[in-house]
């Protein structure tokens, strides 16, 4: 991700997630990170799916709400975006500088 090789990041996260070597409790971060990679490649539907899965696994995952809000905003779903940004803020999310 840091090198902005998003297609490779998607492959790597998928490989780790499907390997079964990590306990399920760690998967929310993997879904959120892979969702971010999907977002960066323009695959908004898959990004949305991954952010939703991260939230399902950890309902208090503020960053996942923020990221899902970014997808909704890009899709023109303003009400959903606002709701997600509010929830992220309520959970204490502070965007990186």
Image: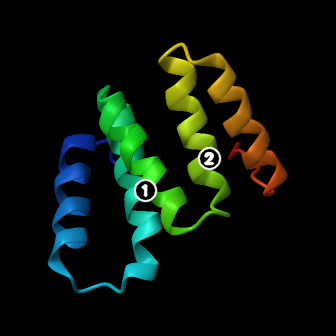
Q: Position of residue 83 (x, y in %)?
A: 72, 34
Mark 1: which secondary structure?
Answer: helix
Badge 2: residue crowd in 10 Å (few <14, some 14–19, many ≥20): many
70 sits left or right of 93 in the view: left
Judge from the rendering whether residue 80 lies leftward or rightward of residue 46; answer left or right: right
The residue nearer to you, when weighing 35 against 87, is 87
> What's the mark number on residue 29?
none
Mark 2 = which residue?
A: 65
The residue under the point 80% across, 46% down is 89
Q: Residue 46 is drawn in which quadrant?
A: top left
Q: Are marks 1 and 2 in contact (CB under 8 Å)?
A: no
Q: Which residue lies most toward the top here?
A: 76
Q: Residues within 10 Å of mark 1 (few under 14, many from 20)?
A: some
Which of the two discs, 1 and 2, labels the residue nearer the N terminus?
1
Give the label on residue 53, or none: 1
Judged from the image, the secondary structure of the residue bearing numbered disc 2 is: helix
Residue occupying image coordinates x 37% and y 33%: 40
Residue at figure coordinates x 50%, y 19% from the top left? 74
Q: Quadrant of the C terminus?
A: top right
* Residue 20 image point, x, y percent: 21, 82
Q: Quadrant of residue 31?
A: bottom left
The answer to whether residue 25 is above or below residue 17 is: below
**Relative to 14, is 1 above or below?**
above
In percent of width and height, residue 76 lies at 54, 13
In the displayed structure, 93 sits above or below 49; it is below
Q: Nearer the viewer, residue 9 or 20?
A: 20
């Amino acid at each position: 991700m840091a090198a902005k090789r998003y297609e490779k990041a998607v492959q790597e996260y998928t490989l780790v997630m499907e390997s079964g070597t990590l306990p399920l409790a760690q998967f929310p971060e993997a879904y959120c990170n892979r969702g971010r990679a999907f977002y960066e490649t323009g695959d908004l539907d898959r990004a949305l799916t991954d952010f939703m899965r991260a939230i399902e696994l950890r309902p208090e995952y503020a960053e996942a709400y923020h990221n899902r809000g970014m997808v909704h905003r890009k899709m023109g779903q303003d009400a959903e975006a606002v709701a997600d940004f509010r929830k992220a803020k309520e959970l204490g999310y502070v965007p990186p500088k």
